[in-house]
Image (tube, rainbow, N blue to C red):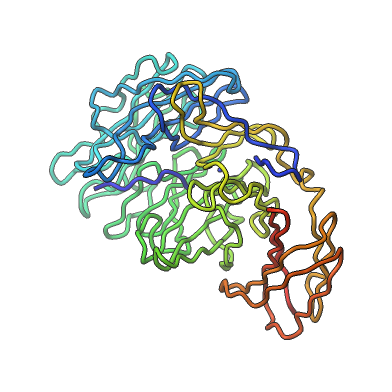
Amino acid sequence: MKKLLLSLSLVAVATTINAQWTAQGTGFSAASRGLSEIRIVDANTVWALAYDGAAPVPPATTGANVQEFTQTTNAGASWTSGTIDVGNTTLKITNISPVSATTAWVGAVDSAAGGGGVFKTSNSGGAWTAQNATAYTTAGTLASYFDFVHFFNASIGITVGDPIGTGVGEFEIYRTTDGGTTWTAVAAASLPNPLSGEYGYTGGYVASGDSMWFTTNKGRLFRTTDKGVTWNAYQAPLSDFGAALPGNNGSVDFSSPSSGCLLKTSGTTASPVYTFYTTSNGGQTWSAGTTFSGTRRILTYVPGTTTIVATSQSAPVGTSVSTDNGSNWTDLEPSGTTQRGASAFLNATTGWCAGFSGTDPLTGGIFKLTGTLSNQSFATTKFSVYPNPASSFVTIAATDVTAYQLSVTDLSGKVVMTKSLNGLENTVDISTFATGAYFFTLNADNKKEVVKILKN
């Protein structure tokens, strides 16, 4: 059965910043509609794809298949939900790719049998019309799975599907330059050969400008920088982007065509290990992994910046942010606050985050960023930790805090020091620490700051 990646894949209510989430109603008549992805067209126009967020009723193990979307054209003042009618209620909607208030495309796939295709709306979701109907068949050895559709603009788009058959051909990729009226298969010469048994993931892609990446079960990133004309494949520092634990899997996001991050999960379900990587060349190479110091793990860039927003729908739910490309994280909501799912940002002042709809169409389902999410928002940080690098002693200077807890961990996640501190300034002896990097976690008044210190 085909696997689904909901996010690759997301502002604050803390008093130390100038931004917060404001709830908006997504317009669904059914309660507990979640949002698997949010796509921002401009400051006023946003589309989002729904899924069943209600707990399944035994013996079912997953929620009902949902073919629904919601849209706003007035910056979220109101949202209008709708049905994605693809003529078969059993098909899974893979993703949604809008380019305006009226025009969008979705992909659909049979999760068990394969096949699938693209459907377009030109009237804000009122009707959906099939395109490239001859592709992604389930016929014999040429069977393929449809993975996703993405449009770079109103004219140029691509669809991606798994390699055609077992050992038969390349990834099944089609390209259009006329808004989907006609589609042309990308030539095999322009595609890297798939590895044995390699396939992509439903909805498993991210785009930035003319560039786009999709992930595979062999831990590779397929990348185009020219809107799908030519492709390269790069090995990421993991073996499978969607593997179940024990093993390793991961998610990626890109701030620009060159800069991105990857969060790898390894170990076991009971004892997961999180490792963080960055790239500055579009995923061709990655930094040496470091222990991820954040507490929320759905990561989303503010485009064109080094600011990453981290959200979570499982404990600890809420929102965190890093303004230095993942080196340091600040929890912006106390643990146990509202669930925050996939997020998307147009810039530091415009963004939305997924929630779950309430008992009526006007109650909840999505949160809008109110205020500014930027480096300046964190000017009132409570702690200053110096020098960095340090050899013997580290000074912690606190503002407006008279008592706080310190926990120091090494790159493996091992706690090497804990202290209860009082006063505005304290000196901590690290002379016995081995050379390397350490994370200083400071907790006070339900707020937490994490600072990375290098010991030399």
Q: Residue at x 47, y 24 (%)?
A: 155
Q: Residue at x 24, y 22 (%)?
A: 87
> Residue lying farthest left?
140
Left or right of 17: which side holds 365?
A: left
Left or right of 109: which side holds 231?
A: right
269 vs 328, nearest the viewer: 269
Position in image of residue 92 (x %, y %): 30, 35
Q: Is residue 81 above or below residue 203?
A: above
Position in image of residue 373 (x %, y %): 70, 40
Q: Residue at x 68, y 32 (%)?
A: 370
22 vs 256, nearest the viewer: 22
Q: Is residue 454 above or below residue 159?
A: below
Q: Residue at x 33, y 31 (%)?
A: 66
Left or right of 352: which side holds 70?
A: left
338 vs 42, nearest the viewer: 338
Label tally: 0
Q: Is residue 9 above or below residue 37?
A: below
Position in image of residue 281 (x %, y %): 59, 55
Position in image of residue 278 (x %, y %): 59, 58
279 vs 322, nearest the viewer: 322
Q: Is residue 62 above or below residue 96?
A: below
**Could you tell me which quadrant the C terminus lies in?**
bottom right
